[in-house]
Amino acid sequence: MQKSGRDIPAVFVWCARTEVAEGAMTEEEWLACARPEQMFRPMPGGGPARKRRLFAVACCRLVFDWLVDNRSREAVNVAEGFADGAVDFHQLERAYDQAFRALGIVGGEPARAATRVALEHLTDANLSDLVALIARSFGTPDGDEWCGAREFQAVLLRDIFGNPFRPVTFSPDWRRDTAVSLARTMYESRDFSAMPVLADALQDAGCDNDDVLDHSRTPGAHVRGCWVVDSVLGKE
Ligand SMILES: [Zn+2]
């Protein structure tokens, strides 16, 4: 497949083949895991449906520029809107149908992933399929690009769900106007470059939680569904 546009940031292109045994997963294993389909295991119920959808959307946005049919791109956008209740199930269903038609014409892993993101129920099997399709969009299994894509999807998952072994109790007192406005602007624009400014605003409001402040100040991937931004906005 001809590849162009968005590449996985070079810092994440290494081949992490962390093996995790079936069953219980420790916090250390979860933090090091490069197998995103396994990382739902420690989360009650596999995590909130909204966040599962936004994770699928974030993965599809890695190949967004490779979706050559606009119906595939629209499915990603509609799925994102569905996550936040901006569109209803019938619109999601139509978006799936259209993306499926596009897949029949253009084929390929990215277009197939764009159908998965618009499925009504994102089961574990569906999400496993989706992350596999995204990884295969970047390269053949076990190659550096494939491993890098798997690792980066794990990074996105950690950004969205936070560490399930260390849930943070977010104080309402930290939700002052400045922080909420910053968080809302970043969420709507999908530009999260002001995360360190958000950290300062939260600190000014009395936030002293290291997990919140470190996440906001550490360079890395932040996407819609970022657990800190969601916490500021009161989203789950
Ligand atoms: Zn984040």
Image: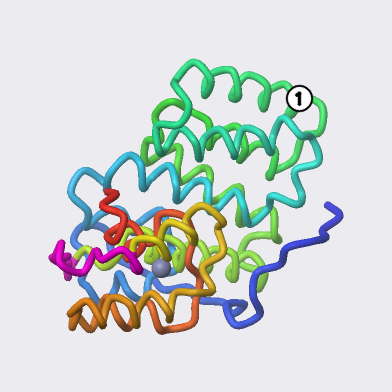
Task: Name the residue located 59 percent from the left edge and 24 percent from the top edge.
Answer: 96
Task: Quadrant for residue 218, please give it.
Answer: bottom left
**Residue 176 magenta-highlighted:** yes
Residue sitting nearer the eye, 20 or 162: 162
Residue 23 position in % (x across, y down): 21, 57
Q: Residues within 10 Å of mark 1 (few under 14, many from 20)?
A: few
Task: Quadrant for residue 122, please give it.
Answer: top left
Task: Name the residue located 56 percent from the left edge and 56 percent from the top edge.
Answer: 189
Query: Image check: 161 left or right of 189?
Result: left
Q: Amino acid at mark 1?
A: Gly
Residue 47 position in % (x across, y down): 27, 48
Residue 40 position in % (x across, y down): 30, 53
What is the tally of numbered marks visible in this picture?
1
Residue 214 position in % (x across, y down): 32, 83
Residue sitting nearer the eye, 220 or 114: 220
Q: Which residues are magenta?
A: 165-179
Quadrant of the image where one finds ligand 1: bottom left
**Residue 185 magenta-highlighted:** no
Task: Name the residue located 28 percent from the left edge and 76 percent from the top edge.
Answer: 202
Q: Is residue 162 above or below residue 99?
A: below
The answer as to whether callout 1 falls within 8 Å of ligand 1 is: no
Residue sitting nearer the eye, 133 or 193: 193
Q: Which residue is mark 1?
A: 104
Query: Image check: 112 left or right of 177?
Result: right
- Label 1 residue SS: helix
Instruction: Label the magenta part by its dominant secondary structure.
Output: loop
Q: Is residue 27 above or below residue 22?
A: below
Task: Quadrant for residue 208, please give it.
Answer: bottom left
As drawn, which residue projects farthest toward the front?
177
What colouring style does the render use?
rainbow
